[in-house]
């Protein structure tokens, strides 16, 4: 099986990033209205996570940072060249690292799991994988 | 030329991955030290928040102020049996009778274990003045130490107050040491004695069907407390 073309990696990343914008925007909009995202199984993990002190950084809900991050990844997935490859990789790396940290907080600090946050962490992991494959496979090569 | 550029980009990428791993590790270590550093790591902050979420609180009363039935819980924050009640029985009563506005629960301090019970009780009343009384009581129980072992320090009480979400810690500190609050602690214990209560937790109920306050003693199940609330209504 041959490695996927750069175009394929970009298209999948565009789709996943668009999906990520939707998830992060949903969490941000619910939080702005004072609510927590609805947990699919009816659990209260999302409420607990949304109410925790970790849900805001510098007074801004972290889901807002998520929307911005996914939007930037969407843009880099549409652009060509090493600049886009490196920027996409860097942003996905930050997003992935932060997702690891947030998942750690949910498991060991907040003692609650929010399915929407886990969903976002999975999307960010996929995007990091795509960005890494794009960079390792195509960095320095003509667009 | 392209190969050189490629090698440089991959080196930058590798360095970025290394930095990211270090950054995440540092974040995790720092945040775990935030509460693991002392001997006051709090348990169940999220759980208590969740159990009480959306229920009105005033002073040490939990529930709709206009609820017809009042269940009084006379407890000592140092009492291990009260902790058991707080974890196993009270949450069911809250869900079945308080959340729907049928009854309210009023926590009253009956400081019988040791002198340390008094500052604990005063701290709970002071938290109640800022609308977080029940959060304080429930969080205290879930982090209770061995009775009369000296764990009820200013640091411990402050950790509980912060974990319970008391917004103004400076005011809480003043309130809990004020003469008025200490008088209230004494008055609540005296009330327990005048009702003939001999241990903690002891429950008392009042409602339309009771002549004043009716002593329930220490019913062993949520069902028994729920029945007493129904009978008082």
Image: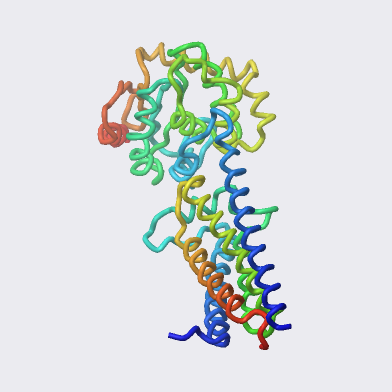
Give the camera-side residue of B7 and A19: B7
Residue drawn at the location 57% of the way across and 29% of the way down: B38
Residue A77 seen in render: yes
Residue A52, x across and y down, in percent: 55, 48
Q: Nearer the viewer, residue A9 or A135?
A: A135
Q: Is residue A68 visible?
A: no
Measured from the top left, where is residue B163 in percent x and y? 56, 37
Classify residue B17 by image quadrant. Answer: bottom right
Against A4, residue A50 (above or below) is: above
Question: Looking at the image, which residue sits at the far right?
Answer: B1
| Quadrant that contains the C terminus of chain A | bottom right
Q: Is residue A21 above or below residue B93?
A: below
Coloring scheme used: rainbow
Q: Is residue A32 above or below residue A10?
A: above
Query: Which residue is nearer to you in this view: A132 or B165?
Result: A132
Residue at 56 percent of width and 70 percent of height: A128
Left or right relative to A62: residue B224: left
Q: Quadrant of residue B183?
A: top right
Please state the horizontal and vertical placement of residue B43, each as a whole percent of the image: 47, 36
Taking the image as shown, residue B206 lies to the left or right of residue A93, namely: left
Percent coordinates x, y for residue A137 in the rendering: 58, 79
Determine the residue positioned at 51% across, 55% down.
Answer: A103
Q: Which quadrant: the N terminus of chain A?
A: bottom left
Is A54 placed above or below B208 here?
A: below
Number of labels in the image equals 0
| Pick the front one: B18 or B144 | B18
């Amino acid at each position: 099986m041959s490695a996927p073309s750069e175009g394929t990696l970009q298209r999948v990343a565009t789709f996943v990033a668009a999906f990520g914008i939707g998830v992060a925007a949903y969490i941000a909009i619910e939080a702005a209205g004072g609510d927590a995202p609805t947990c699919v199984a009816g659990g209260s993990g999302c409420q607990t996570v949304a109410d925790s002190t970790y849900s805001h950084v510098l007074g801004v809900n972290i889901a807002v940072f998520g929307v911005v991050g996914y939007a930037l990844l969407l843009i880099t997935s549409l652009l060509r060249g090493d600049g886009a490859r490196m920027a996409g990789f860097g942003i996905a790396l930050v997003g992935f690292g932060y997702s690891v940290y947030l998942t750690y907080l949910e498991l060991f600090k907040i003692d609650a799991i929010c399915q929407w946050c886990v969903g976002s962490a999975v999307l960010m992991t996929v995007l990091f994988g795509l960005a890494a494959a794009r960079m390792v496979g195509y960095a320095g090569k003509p667009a | 030329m392209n190969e050189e550029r490629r090698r440089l980009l991959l080196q930058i990428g590798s360095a970025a991955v290394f930095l990211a791993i270090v950054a995440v590790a540092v974040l995790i270590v720092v945040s775990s030290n935030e509460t693991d550093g002392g001997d006051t790591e709090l348990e169940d902050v999220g759980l208590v928040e969740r159990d009480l979420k959306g229920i009105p609180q005033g002073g040490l009363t939990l529930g709709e102020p206009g609820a017809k039935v009042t269940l009084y819980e006379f407890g000592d924050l140092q009492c291990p049996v009260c902790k058991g009640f707080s974890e196993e029985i009270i949450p069911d009563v809250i869900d079945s009778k308080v959340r729907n506005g049928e009854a309210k629960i009023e926590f009253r301090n009956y400081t019988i274990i040791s002198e340390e019970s008094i500052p604990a009780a005063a701290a709970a009343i002071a938290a109640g003045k800022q609308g977080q009384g029940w959060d304080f009581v429930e969080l205290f129980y879930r982090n209770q130490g061995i009775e009369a072992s000296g764990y009820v320090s200013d640091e411990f009480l402050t950790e509980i107050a912060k974990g319970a979400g008391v917004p103004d810690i400076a005011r809480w500190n003043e309130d809990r040491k004020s003469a008025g609050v200490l008088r209230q602690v004494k008055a609540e214990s005296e009330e327990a004695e005048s009702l003939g209560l001999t241990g903690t937790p002891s429950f008392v109920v009042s409602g339309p069907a009771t002549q004043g306050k009716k002593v329930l003693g220490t019913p062993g199940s949520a069902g028994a407390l729920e029945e007493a609330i129904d009978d008082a209504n």
